[in-house]
Image (spheres, grey):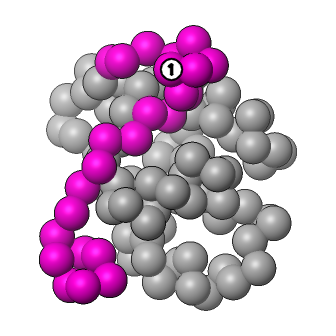
Amino acid sequence: MNGGGRAEAEAAHIKPVEHAGPDSIQNGIALSGTVHWMFDRGLIGLSDELEILVHRKVNDRQGVEAMINSTGRLQAPALAAHRPHPAFLAWHRDFHGFS
């Protein structure tokens, strides 16, 4: 839900095309506009087990956690072939300094 209470979803690349990321289902996730913005800037990321990670550089951790799935995990597709590929998730974590 967005700030106006309306459902929204945007397709987000895990590894951006500008960094040689492909336009493929395993390199994408559906996020709200605000969460997409946070993901693109490395404020949040995903573990290989699809746990939502909040970066240590986030100043308002509670505010970020209020916007993400309360389970702390990505709601992933049932088919493994449609889930984010670990190589793209690892690229995103490395690029944004999650280690």
Q: In the structure shown, which secondary structural element does the residue marked by tag 1 occupy?
A: helix
Q: Name the quarter where the N terminus is drawn.
A: bottom left
The residue at the point 44 percent across, 66 percent down is 34
| Residue kind at label 1, given as amino acid type | Val
> Horizontal and vertical percent for residue 71?
40, 71
Q: Residue at x 29, y 24 (%)?
A: 25
Mark 1 sits on what residue?
A: 17
At a point 31% along the width and 41% down the height, the residue shown is 11
Segment tinted magenta in the rendering? 1-24
Q: Main secondary structure of the magenta part?
A: loop
> Which quadrant is home to the C terminus?
top right
Q: Residue 38, how many percent across, how many down?
A: 56, 60
Q: Nearer the viewer, residue 7 or 73?
A: 7
Quadrant of res 59: bottom right
Q: Is 72 a magenta residue?
A: no
Instruction: Answer left or right for 80 relative to 16.
Output: left
In the picture shown, does residue 80 fall above or below 5? above
Describe residue 96's horizontal placement relative to residue 14 as left or right.
right
